[in-house]
């Protein structure tokens, strides 16, 4: 049977180099990598990651559980997570929980059985806390669970920035529209930051929330319709995602309300798409790439047995475009 | 050490049932599943998928290689792929090649080392063919490689339907805008179907193509600008994706060209997003869910050692909305 030593000899490199190429760790010149692959092919050498995983008790796999891969924010986050994991020699096992608690639970057990080295968990179901055992590193996104480190954007500040901008632009009749506040998500802080800032000015916020576990265009549309069915003239809306903002703007213009002249709308996330809409969406930018990079860093620290900061809140900023 | 037999006894079920719960195969009543999980937790039983994988030479993992996870078409496809894989007791190892040939090659080797049971490959790099060995089941998406089964939407028909619709609406000055035709992708058939249909009417098509390996909003915008910088009055555009269509429509209206009054635009894909734009995008619908379902079916057939149809082309349809 061909061994790494055979490959190393024939390629004229050290066994360490062969191992690095196979595990995609450390710096390897393209030329060397190419040579090693070529020899591996000539000798028909197939490294067996499964056997290696058993012998070193490490799979070099990270589990990623997302509520909705098809949502542009999560697909962008996933793309970055995969990228940084790959740069560190890790593979991603993807789980799309579709916001079903039972599926999420199955996934956690499956990933444990698969001996992943750590889990990045963006949970959108109630009562996830009791499912998480600390027998392997877990990092949650936008969710705070006792004893588990978490990462998120500064949702509260995002809400505050949105409020400050709308107030500065003269809006007085303010609406918040977002996901269900029933779920114990840190993104609910967007509402809190928004409301507190508006209230401090002596003004009120009317809130509209989507049904539990929904990332659905139809649902956004329905909610947007409700807002404009109301008689009261609204002049400022903070939507908890750019997609919701787009749905609101569309519905507003369908009702003859011009954005931003009659109504100012701010989104959240700063999706690549935010600039494809007309008007381009003014938004609060989540630092998606930084969340992914820091998220992978934290998980790998935990995998190495190092202490990890519990609270990891990344800064946000207002991106002024056309809708507000 | 706790075994499956211990779990079965304590839960009052058969070992087969425990195994089914662990492997997520076959029908299991929610109550039974719950009970088995509970006992597993009480006994602190951790099934070891890695060891099982070695003993049965099957990992129950499928590799999925995509060119750009953040692109809404691929994130939607991925979401469905994960869903159908999960329903069949398979996990997804995700690889985001970002259209880099070297990364794609690394991934194929990595997935092989990981002993995945099969690979779903949407490659957007040149010369992938020689990297693919038939030592494990591979299904390609939108790409035809000798000896490898492939799946795609009926790209040629999509192009034909787009042309027929634009012609029926009276368009005469026609443009195609899409990804690089240099890559040997089956999606290039969209252009071919479009062009042949237009030519048969005695009319011509001007084509604009993105740079190799680009799914970039800036690139779409640049191309769209080029189209309208041209003096010739254009009245019909077929864009090879809804995102490109959205960029074109935005650029048109920035130039005072009204869609669909002055210019009709048809997209491709039928993203969920197509209905969020104003005007809503008329498009050719790829049957994304069906591609994923059939794709997983084909891969699992191949995993079982069964013969698999080489050519799997799924039907498309024109979805008439507002932009054409």
Image: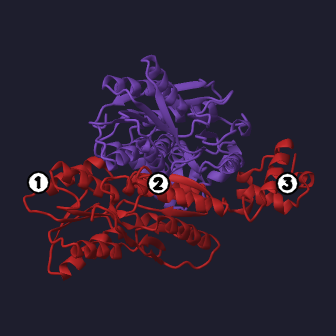
Chain colours: A red, B purple
Q: Secondary structure at mark 3?
A: helix
Residue pointed to by mark 1: A229
A252 and B21: which is toward the camera: A252
On the image, the x and y values in percent for residue A192 come to 27, 74
In this rendering, the answer to whether A306 lies above or below B298 is: below
Q: CA distance from mark 2 to mark 1?
A: 33 Å
| Earlier-in-chain disc, 3 versus 2 | 3
| Location of the N terminus of chain B (image quadrant) | bottom right
Residue A4: numbered disc: 3
On the image, the x and y values in percent for residue B12 come to 47, 49
Q: Residue at x 19, y 54 (%)?
A: A252
Mark 3 chain: A
Q: CA distance from mark 3 to mark 1?
A: 70 Å
Mark 3, other Cα within 10 Å: few <14 / some 14–19 / many ≥20: some
Residue pointed to by mark 2: A75
Mark 1, other Cα within 10 Å: few <14 / some 14–19 / many ≥20: few
Residue A73's quadrant in the figure?
A: bottom left
On the image, the x and y values in percent for residue A138 come to 52, 67
Left-right relation of B168 to B115:
left
Q: Secondary structure at mark 1?
A: helix
Q: Residue at x 49, y 74 (%)?
A: A149
Badge 2 and badge 1 in a common chain? yes
Q: Secondary structure at mark 2?
A: helix
Mark 2, other Cα within 10 Å: few <14 / some 14–19 / many ≥20: many
């Amino acid at each position: 049977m061909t061994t790494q030593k055979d490959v190393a000899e024939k390629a004229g490199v050290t066994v360490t180099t062969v191992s690095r190429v196979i595990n995609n760790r450390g710096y390897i010149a393209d030329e060397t990598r190419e040579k090693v692959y070529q020899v591996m092919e000539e000798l028909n050498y197939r490294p067996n990651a499964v056997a290696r995983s058993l012998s070193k008790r490490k799979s070099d796999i990270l589990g990623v559980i997302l509520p909705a891969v098809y949502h542009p924010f999560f697909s962008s986050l996933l793309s970055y997570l995969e990228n940084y994991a790959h740069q560190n020699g890790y593979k991603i096992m993807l789980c799309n929980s579709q916001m079903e608690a039972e599926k999420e639970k199955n996934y956690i057990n499956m990933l444990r059985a698969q001996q992943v080295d750590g889990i990045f968990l963006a949970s959108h179901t109630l009562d996830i806390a009791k499912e998480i055992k600390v027998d392997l590193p877990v990092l949650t996104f936008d969710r705070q669970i006792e004893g588990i480190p978490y990462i998120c954007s500064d949702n509260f500040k995002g809400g505050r920035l949105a409020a400050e901008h709308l107030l500065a632009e003269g809006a007085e009749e303010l609406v918040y529209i977002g996901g269900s506040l029933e779920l114990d998500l840190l993104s609910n802080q967007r509402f809190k930051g928004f409301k507190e800032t508006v209230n401090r000015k002596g003004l009120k916020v009317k809130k509209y929330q989507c049904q539990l576990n929904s990332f659905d265009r139809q649902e956004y549309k329905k909610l947007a319709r409700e807002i404009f069915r109301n008689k009261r003239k609204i002049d400022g809306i903070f939507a908890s995602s750019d997609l919701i903002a787009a749905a609101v703007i569309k519905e507003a213009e369908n009702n003859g309300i011009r954005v931003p002249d009659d109504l100012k709308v701010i989104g959240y996330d700063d999706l690549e798409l935010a600039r494809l809409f007309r008007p381009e969406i003014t938004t609060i930018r989540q630092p998606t790439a930084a969340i992914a990079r820091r998220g992978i860093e934290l998980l790998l620290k935990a995998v190495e047995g190092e202490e990890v900061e519990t609270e990891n809140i990344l800064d946000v900023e207002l991106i002024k475009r056309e809708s507000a």
